[in-house]
Image: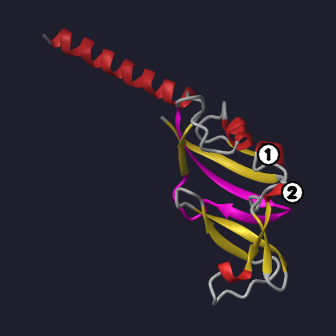
């Protein structure tokens, strides 16, 4: 019985060692549940960061991240850090000239005095809010830019993978 306990203990310690090796060897790949810290900048200005917050969590390969970010995270290991640029084509695309729409000023809430560059909130068909930028203010209408605010921008990322499951 004493020998059987010793064998079981050796097997358990081997299995624990194997699971640690696999966890250390884990890389970001499709199906991985990944958490990472990040800072995103445009033209040297930080626009978003997880600093002081929980790491961003996602499942790799589900398409929830912009393609350029997902592509650069692929193959990374826990603890690995990386800095990279994501071109507009792999982020929010180039601005679409047809995404400008002229709307009557009367359709805006009365308390809003539109100014060029101002961001307002619009809702899609499902009721989700998204930002729109005032591009031009005319006497009776306002030209709204429905492009994503980061369209046409190259994004600079600094990331660190904190966990992979």
Instruction: Point out the residue furthest to the left here.
Output: 1
Q: Quadrant of residue 102?
A: bottom right
What's the distance in space between the residues labelled 2 and 1, CA to CA? 28 Å
Question: 30 or 104, which lies in front?
Answer: 104
Give coordinates of residue 60: x percent, y percent.
58, 35
Question: 68 or 55, which lies in front?
Answer: 68
74 part of magenta stretch = no
Give coordinates of residue 162: x percent, y percent.
56, 45
Q: Quadrant of residue 19?
A: top left
Residue in view at x 84 percent, y 63 percent: 44
Q: Which mark is residue 15?
A: none
The residue carrying pointer 2 sits among few (fewer than 14), some (14 to 19) or many (20 or more) residues within 10 Å by Cα, namely: few
The residue carrying pointer 1 sits among few (fewer than 14), some (14 to 19) or many (20 or more) residues within 10 Å by Cα, namely: some
Residue 153 visible in the current orientation: no
Q: Is residue 74 depicted above or below 41 in this figure?
A: above
Residue in view at x 37 percent, y 20 percent: 15
Q: Which mark is residue 84?
A: 1
Q: Nearer the viewer, mark 2 or mark 1?
A: 2
Q: Which mark is residue 97?
A: 2
Q: Secondary structure at mark 1?
A: strand
Q: Is residue 156 left or right of residue 35?
A: right
Between disc 2 and disc 1, whose residue precedes? 1
Residue 123 visible in the current orientation: yes
| Magenta region | 32-55
54 part of magenta stretch = yes
Q: Is residue 84 left or right of residue 35?
A: right
């Amino acid at each position: 019985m004493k020998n059987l306990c010793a064998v079981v203990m050796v097997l358990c310690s081997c299995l624990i060692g194997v699971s640690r090796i696999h966890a250390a060897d884990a890389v970001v790949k499709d199906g991985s549940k990944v958490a990472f810290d990040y800072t995103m900048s445009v033209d040297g200005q930080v626009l978003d960061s997880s600093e002081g917050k929980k790491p961003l969590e996602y499942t790799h390969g589900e398409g929830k991240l912009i393609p350029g970010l997902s592509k650069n995270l692929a193959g990374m290991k826990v603890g690995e850090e990386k800095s990279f640029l994501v071109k507009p084509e792999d982020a929010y695309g180039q601005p679409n000239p047809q995404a400008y729409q002229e709307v009557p000023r009367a359709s805006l809430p009365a308390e809003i005095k539109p100014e060029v560059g101002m961001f307002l909130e619009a809702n899609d068909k499902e009721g989700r809010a998204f930002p729109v930028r005032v591009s031009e203010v005319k006497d009776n209408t306002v030209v709204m830019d429905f492009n994503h605010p980061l369209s046409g921008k190259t994004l600079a990322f600094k990331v660190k993978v904190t966990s992979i499951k």
